[in-house]
Amino acid sequence: MRIVILGSGRVGSRLANALVDKGHTLVVVDESERKFKALNEHSDIHRIEGNIFDDEISNRAFSEVADVFIVVTGKDNVNVMVAQAIQTKYQIKKILTRIFDPDLADVYRMLGFEIICPTSYTISEIKNILGEG
Amino acid sequence: MYIIVVGGGSIGRNLTKFLLSAKHEVLLIEKDEARVASLAPQLGEAVIAGDGSRVPTLREGGANRADVLVAVTGADEENLVICQVAKTVFKCPRTIARVNDPRDEGLFSALGVDATVSSTRVINSLIEEQVNADTMIIPLLTLRAGNVEIIEMGLSKNSGVMEKRIREMRLPEGARIIAILRGDEVVVPTGESRLILGDKILALVKKEVEQSLRELL
């Protein structure tokens, strides 16, 4: 699969490294070149430095049809806006958006988005460990 | 009407004051506690601290009964989320967003924000008007000195000043007609000039008499 990831932080870069080992092609976009440090050197990990809201950057990221777009910058509101902007522009089949705030996560699930909410996962994980699940 | 304004920068602050003076019920939501503290003496209970892009804040602010929500923070992603939460969760009938980056404008309307205001676009069009001044499109200005402005007005069909000489019109004190725009022609008026159907005028006018000038014409 061809997978585009926005945000090369702890999650984004590790995810890219893991997915490329499974044989996928990765495109990782981040505004700051420093963030690419944690990415493995691999011919199937393409790095794009810049703002995804610039047409030039997004056109490069989606120059080939992407199967999945994963949005994991550190800011909920940015993730939500990017997911919608990219969906409007490129009609990606699968977009996964990270939202830390559980209320906001519910809102965008209601609007039909596929949302990953780390806060909810953490809480339910802890509840499981405590046998309160 | 009940109106919620999110973002207490200079736009949000002045908008809130204006809406209050127009007798609306208004709540300003601002994230920064220090800024809220500085606004509280003037706005009292009309300002609260909180992140307006979060559900509990909007609930606390009574978004479920708001007629209009206006998001004017300096970050487009916040303004978008604020409007979408207000619409989705609180069924707010009308949402208006400030767009800081003109590129986002199309996106906002595609995503269900009812209206957008782009200061960049407004400023650009003002500058264009200035640039076009040579080609006879005259800019409408508020003069820096304060309460005097130059306005353009059309003549209404049954205006009482039609066919009258300017010196016969009872122009309000503090209003002067400085040009008559007649087709492609610009007439520099004297007391003897007459206004005819289809004319537009440019007037230098004190703000407090602008309304009476409009009524006269």
Image (cartoon, rainbow, N blue to C red):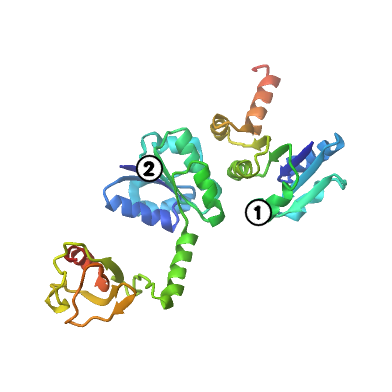
The amino acid pointed to by label 2 is Val
User: Residue B147: x percent and y percent?
Assistant: 28, 70
Q: Residues within 10 Å of mark 1 (few under 14, many from 20)?
A: few
The label number, if any, that marks residue B68 in the structure image = 2
Q: To which quarter of the image does residue B152 belong?
A: bottom left
Q: Where does label 1 land, which residue?
A: A55
- Residue A11 vs B177, above or below: the answer is above
Seen at 36% across and 44% down, the residue is: B3
Q: Is residue B168 left or right of residue B139?
A: left
Seen at 34% across and 45% down, the residue is: B26
Seen at 74% across and 48% down, the residue is: A63
Query: Disc 1: which chain?
Result: A
User: Residue B166: x percent and y percent?
Assistant: 17, 77
Q: Is residue A115 left or right of residue A45?
A: left
Query: Disc 2: which chain?
Result: B
Q: To which quarter of the image does residue A80 belong?
A: top right
User: Residue B129: x percent and y percent?
Assistant: 43, 70
User: Residue B114: x percent and y percent?
Assistant: 44, 44
Quadrant in which the N terminus of chain B appears:
top left
Q: Residues within 10 Å of mark 2 (few under 14, many from 20)?
A: some
Quadrant in which the C terminus of chain B appears:
bottom left
Marks 2,1: beta carbons within 8 A:
no
Q: Is residue A89 left or right of residue B53?
A: right
Secondary structure under tag 2 reads: strand
The amino acid pointed to by label 1 is Asp
Q: To which quarter of the image does residue A40 belong?
A: top right
